[in-house]
Image: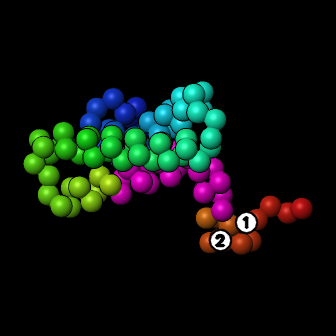
Amino acid sequence: MIDFPVTPEALGTVAGIAILGALITQWLKQGLKQAMLINLVTLGLCEILSVLAGLIVVAFQPTARDLFNSLLIGFSGATLAVFGYELVKNTIELVHPSLEPSP
């Protein structure tokens, strides 16, 4: 079960960051009209929030591994939030070409 990211532990997962990233993206679309800027701001905010959640979980005494995990979770979650459907669809088509839709 995936919890809505309202705790640092839930936010510190790829699913939690992806959900928050999708919400951030929708808010940014209302205020910013440049798609590239929206994607970069979403990535930056997801990275910051992921690292902050990771720091809170380890009581602000992280190891290098904790920071690396937080950065990777932030990047993965932001990627899913911004490119979600297309990323999954294209990756599946690369892995299993026989699953491509017929014309």
User: What kind of residue is marked 1?
Assistant: Leu
Q: Residue at x 33, y 29 (%)?
A: 6
Residue 67: where, in percent of width, then height? 23, 55
Secondary structure state at the residue bearing disc 1: helix
Where the C terminus falls, by quadrant? bottom right
Residue 83: where, in percent of width, then height? 59, 51
Q: Which residue is mark 2?
A: 94
Mostly what secondary structure, the magenta segment?
Answer: helix
Q: Is residue 43 visible to us here?
A: yes
Q: Which residue is mark 1?
A: 99
Towards the viewer: 35 or 81: 35
Quadrant location of residue 69? Answer: bottom left
- Magenta residues span 72-90
102 to the left or right of 6: right
Q: Is residue 14 visible to us here?
A: no
Residue contact between numbered discs 2 and 1, judged by CB atoms under 8 Å: no
Q: Residue at x 40, y 32 (%)?
A: 4
In space, the residues marked 2 and 1 are separated at their CA atoms by 9 Å
Towards the viewer: 97 or 57: 57
Assess whether residue 87 is covered by the magenta stretch: yes
Q: Residue at x 47, y 42 (%)?
A: 41
